[in-house]
Image (spheres, grey):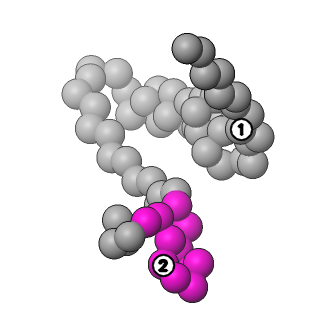
Amino acid sequence: MIPGGWIDEEGRDRRGFKEIRYKVKIDTKSPEEKVRELYQLAKEKCPVSDMLLNPTPVKGEVSIED
């Protein structure tokens, strides 16, 4: 966190993450080939990965009630 806010005075730093990394350890009796196939399928079809890798519009609204 940058003291005083999300960006510096020059506006140089993004508010979001710079990188997201993960490491998965799998303990299984399944053949390595099958595990790698599943990993590839997850990378291709996972909606979270898709959202992170491709621009996704974010919309919201605020409602204040007394």
| Count of labels in the image | 2
Which residue type does callout 1 highlight?
Val
User: Residue pushed farthest bottom?
Assistant: 10
Mark 1–mark 2 contact, CB under 8 Å? Answer: no
Residue at point 50%, 71% (across, down): 7
Which residue type does callout 2 highlight?
Asp
User: Residue pushed farthest front?
Assistant: 66
Instruction: Classify the position of the C terminus by image quarter.
Output: top right
Residue 58 - label: 1
Compared with 12, 63 (above or below) is above
Q: Nearer the viewer, residue 19 or 1?
A: 1
User: Residue pushed farthest left?
Assistant: 27
Residue 43 lies in the magenta stretch: no
- Give how far across and how far down residue 10 sits, in percent: 57, 85
Check disc 2 and report the residue beneath it: 8
The magenta stretch is: 5-15
Residue at point 72%, 47% (across, down): 54
Overall secondary structure of the magenta section? loop
Residue at point 61%, 45% (across, down): 52
